[in-house]
Amino acid sequence: MIKVAFFDTKAYDKPSFEHYGQLHDMQFRFLETKLNEDTVELARGCDAVCVFVNDTVNAKVIDQLHGMGVKLIALRSAGYNNVDIHSAYGKVHVVHVPAYSPYAVAEHAMALLLTSIRRIHKAYIRTRDFNFSLNGLTGFDLHGKTVGVIGTGKIGRIFIDICRGFGMNVIAYDLFPAKDSGIKYVSLEELFRSSDIISLHCPLTDETRHMINADAIETMKKGIVIINTSRGGLIDTEALLEGIKARKVGAACLDVYEEEADIFFEDRSGHILNDELLARLISMPNVIVTSHQAFLTEEALNNIAETTVNNILSYFENDGLCDNELCYRCGNIERCKKERKEKCF
Ligand code: NAI
């Protein structure tokens, strides 16, 4: 039986993982705590750990996992910026779920955008209080507006299709533009300059960290709407707040936040929020924050559990080979798969 320590367990994770685990004689040790240097010991005796976006899988944690004989880190997410994959090379293999429902995330990005610009969040609260006034609820048409999409991978491209359905003019920027996609690629500078709405769908890397900063916001149109369903670190939050206070940024729709790790996914309603920046952002009438919820659909949860269990099985029962193993050199599995026919190490 393959034993897996499952960190940062939430109630919605369990049913699908229990279902697929039982099918394959896999035992999950469900732990509510996040993985970090203080909690890594809880994985002792397990063959693999299963982690999510806010678990800390740094060099020290990897060395400790390696030392206690854990062979595999199975991410139940697509993004893997929380894993030091270079340190994992030669020690512990890392697999992820490249796509579970890109539709879930792209649709959430559009849901945030519509909610924000049509003031649905305000209207909902008003009518519950029998306040049927329309003052202050004026929105704008998406039709004919220019949306700039940064990152045209699986999620970005679905978001583009959705935007086209609304009659929007789509421009995009990607480090690796998709050939023959019919997408109009422009430079990042032009995208910042020309967009009415910007939606982020690229990974968080050293290169993309704080790509939306004070300088970038300065070059954007007045009233720019910024949507981030990718990773919080893509935006310099202080600069965003300044842009909002200066009335330059018209609205921000945030499903992710750079300091979300100790805040998101938990009920903090009875506590004082110690994060001034987040509290100030949430207090703004033109900011909508959801707590990393974009992935959360039934379809996605099922796909995540099925793919993660298959990744683990594939690793332990297929001589260590797994299609969804990350590349420890370039960190880009799509590119590497073409070159790599064997295990990384
Ligand atoms: P993907 O790998 O299919 O696409 C990412 C795209 O970004 C690729 O086309 C890549 O060439 C491009 N890219 C890489 N570096 C870039 C750079 N420096 N500048 C511009 N583009 C760059 O990934 P997918 O599945 O579309 O996911 C995108 C992101 O969405 C993930 O990295 C993850 O952080 C986030 N995500 C968020 C979720 C949520 O619940 N909020 C759930 C799933 C993913």
Image (cartoon, rainbow, N blue to C red):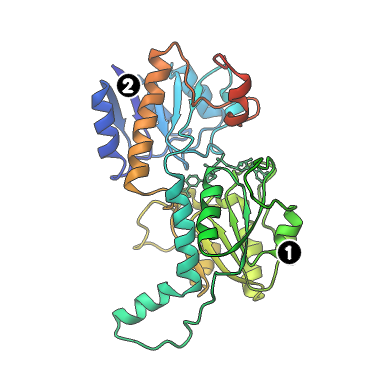
What is the CA distance from the residue labelled 2 to the residue labelled 1?
52 Å
Q: Earlier in the sequence, mark 2 or mark 1?
A: 2
Q: Residues within 10 Å of mark 2 (few under 14, many from 20)?
A: some
Q: What amino acid is labelled 2 in the image?
A: Lys
Cβ of disc 2 within 8 Å of ligand 1? no
**Residue at left offset 45%, top offset 68%:** 115
Q: Position of residue 344 (x, y in %)?
A: 57, 17
Cβ of disc 1 within 8 Å of ligand 1? no
Q: Position of residue 119 (x, y in %)?
A: 46, 75
Q: Position of residue 315 (x, y in %)?
A: 43, 18
Q: What amino acid is labelled 1 in the image?
A: Arg
Q: Residues within 10 Å of mark 1 (few under 14, many from 20)?
A: some
- Between tags 2 and 1, which lies in front? 1
In the rendering, which numbered label is found on residue 3? 2
Q: Would you say 329 lies left or right of 269 here?
A: right
The image shows residue 345, relative to residue 172, as above or below, that is: above
Residue 330 seen in render: yes
Rendered image quadrant of residue 40? top left
Residue 257 seen in render: no
Q: Quadrant of ligand 1?
A: top right
The image shows residue 236, relative to residue 85, as above or below, that is: below
Q: Secondary structure at mark 2?
A: strand
Whether tag 2 and tag 1 are in contact, CB under 8 A, the answer is no
**Residue at left offset 47%, top offset 74%:** 118
**Residue at left offset 27%, top offset 22%:** 24
- Give the number of marks: 2
Q: Would you say 344 lies left or right of 52 here?
A: right
Q: Would you say 75 lies left or right of 338 here?
A: left
Q: Which residue is mark 1?
A: 193
| Front-lying residue, 89 or 195 | 195
The image shows residue 11, relative to residue 241, as above or below, that is: above
| Front-lying residue, 239 or 314 | 314
